[in-house]
Amino acid sequence: MTHQPVLRVMRLPDADPALPLPSYQTAGAAGADLCANLAPADRVQGVTLPPMGRALIPTGLALAIPQGWEVQVRPRSGLALKHGLTLPNSPGTIDCDYRGPLGVIVLNLGDAPFTIRHGDRIAQMVVAPAPQARFELVDALDDTVRGQGGFGSTGGAGL
Ligand SMILES: O=c1ccn([C@H]2C[C@H](O)[C@@H](COP(=O)(O)OP(=O)(O)OP(=O)(O)O)O2)c(=O)[nH]1
């Protein structure tokens, strides 16, 4: 590994201090799991999403991401496969200058209601380099073999 970024993580005042901070579950995990830090009123019953229901689930955390990096919030494959739980904006983009509450937008694509409980590991965050480009207006673009081919132009998979 060339450079390991340091992310500052702050627990919000109303967050449950008993919940773990984002954590990698294995030595090679790309994503650190994020827990649902439900509002006190939801902690007994949980938050139930009907089929096609969506909600913003708080994590109780705010981040300071170093300049030039981003955090991507992604679904967990087990929840997606077993329950159809996904993130409609996946990967959610957390900007390095954002200091507000980190939230997870969940969507139940399953055919049964799904309940998120306080403390459930509902998503994972991946820290990724995100350089800002400089956009340069030009009159023509250089030629390539692909040219304007796209959207299945190379065939395969029934295209
Ligand atoms: O899953 C997400 C996505 C975004 N955010 C926060 C952090 C991010 O930096 C900010 C803005 O997100 P984004 O740029 O995707 O939203 P937008 O709809 O373009 O809003 P804005 O105009 O505020 O940038 O919202 C989250 O907490 N969770």
Image (spheres, rainbow, N blue to C red):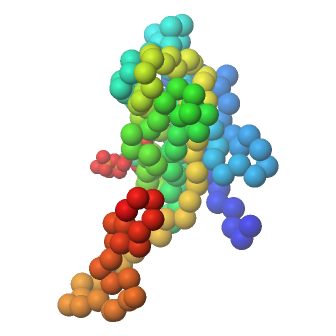
Q: Name the spot of residue 30 as percent of width and height, x first.
A: 66, 52
Give the mark count: 0
Question: Residue drawn 49% across and 65% down?
Answer: 130
Question: Residue drawn 58% across and 55% down?
Answer: 127
Q: Quadrant of residue 99?
A: top left
Q: Name the spot of residue 128 as percent of width and height, x first.
A: 56, 59
The answer, for residue 104, to whether it is visible in the render is no
Apparent side of residue 33 relative to residue 144 in the rendered image (left or right): right
Which residue occupies the extreme front position in the image? 158
Which residue occupies the extreme top position in the image? 44
Query: Viewer-proximal residue, 60 or 79?
Result: 79
The answer, for residue 111, to whether it is visible in the render is yes
Question: Residue drawn 74% across and 67% down?
Answer: 1
Query: Viewer-proximal residue, 31 or 113?
Result: 113
Q: Name the spot of residue 41 as percent of width and height, x first.
A: 46, 10
Question: Residue drawn 50% across and 17% down?
Answer: 115
